[in-house]
Image (tube, grey):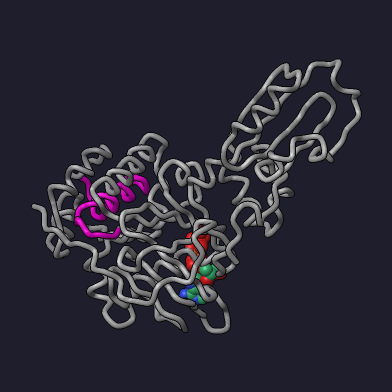
Amino acid sequence: MERPFPPPPFKGTSSNESESNGATSHDPADLIVRTRDLTKRYGNFLALDRCNLEVRAGEIFGLLGPNGAGKSTLIRLLLGYLHVTSGSCEVVGKNPEIDSVAVRRGVAYLPGDARLPRHMRGDGLLKFFAQMHPLGDLKRSLEVAERLELDLSRRVAFMSTGMRQKLALAVVFGPRTPLLILDEPTANLDPTVRGEVLNLVLTQRDEGRTVMFSSHVLSEIEQTCDRVAFLRRGELVRRLTMQELFQRHRVTAVLNDEETDGSDTDEPLGKIPEILADRIERVSIVGRQVRIDTAGDLGPALSWLASLPVHQVRIEPLGLHTVYQSVHRAVPVAEATGPYDSPDVTSDQMGEVS
Ligand SMILES: Nc1ncnc2c1ncn2[C@@H]1O[C@H](COP(=O)(O)OP(=O)(O)OP(=O)(O)O)[C@@H](O)[C@H]1O
């Protein structure tokens, strides 16, 4: 049974955030989540510090950050499970401090540590939750359980951790709420099921719903999200659209022997045409290898390379991993290293917002 629940318009002042760097500057009516200087202290401990965040209706929004960064705190504030220390937030058009029931009616929430009644069997539990939620839809929950290949005849107490996660997901994907907030939805799942859950997330967007989710698996965020925000020690330190991310590439070219003298240099901008200077963020030449980091259109860099005696070319996306590492360690992207090659671009070139 389908009962439409359109996202109510957000009634507030227009955003003063800039359009660039993943920040939004959309019609406030499009916003399904908005926080203004949202702050949470646990005693003297500052867990969330003046967080300004906007999530647009219909997007998949990723929340990233190392352990203890404040992701769950932010999510719990949005749902009214925690009291705000200062600042404010509005979710599906309601203030969770004032009307948390209305917020939870419009949001399907998967907690990071979903605890389910141990004595219940899977099928009974889905029925129970479908009856509890005003937008509950048992058929949808059963479909999700089937898709995730979950045996619903077992009691929760006898389910594995991954099976319980599947059951919690079947509960959450049931009601057709305008907003889904998922705290690490793929935790404890095997790779096949993870893929299935990501497909489910994408399907929600196709149905016009908004999904906000946290994850430590960067490839999942890359595959699904439209925008991401990075939290570090309670601070929202960066926002990025996936479009911005996917426009960043590293081009590595190996030149023919006779064109290089074997010396290493790191001052290539003088050697490349003026027109490329604003598109190429960094070039380094080591021996016969030229490495170029670009943002935006690859054409000019490739045209320039085509004028050189190139022997081999490799093009790779710079990827979320590099940005994440720079945020995590609070170092410029140039110094972030990891399993991928580290780029030489600086953090302000990657969309710093604060
Ligand atoms: N009830 C609490 N009382 C005191 N400190 C808390 C409480 N809940 C969370 N914290 C602290 O607040 C900080 C943020 O915690 P939070 O759970 O929001 O982080 P997180 O980003 O969700 O982490 P993880 O990725 O590990 O789930 C942590 O330092 C945590 O220890």
Judge whether 196 appears above or below 105 on screen: above
The answer to whether one can see residue 314 in this image is yes
Location of residue 249 (image quadrant): top right
Q: Is residue 1 magenta?
A: no
Residue at left offset 67%, top offset 45%: 278
Indicate the position of residue 45 as horizontal and vertical percent values: 57, 79
Q: Is residue 158 left or right of residue 69?
A: left
Residue at left offset 74%, top offset 35%: 273
Which span of residues is magenta-colored? 153-179
Indicate the position of residue 125 as horizontal and vertical percent values: 18, 55
Q: Is residue 155 magenta?
A: yes
Which residue occupies the foreground of this view, 88 or 199? Answer: 88
Residue at left offset 54%, top offset 57%: 21
Instruction: Please give the count of numbered marks on the rendered protein.
Output: 0
The answer to whether one can see residue 159 in this image is no
Which residue occupies the foreground of this view, 351 or 306? Answer: 306
Q: Is residue 276 left or right of residue 105?
A: right
Where does the C terminus fall, quadrant-wise? Answer: bottom right
Indicate the position of residue 61 as horizontal and vertical percent values: 41, 55
Residue at left offset 56%, top offset 45%: 320
Location of residue 46 (image quadrant): bottom right
Indicate the position of residue 285 as horizontal and vertical percent values: 81, 32
Q: Is residue 19 left or right of residue 107?
A: right
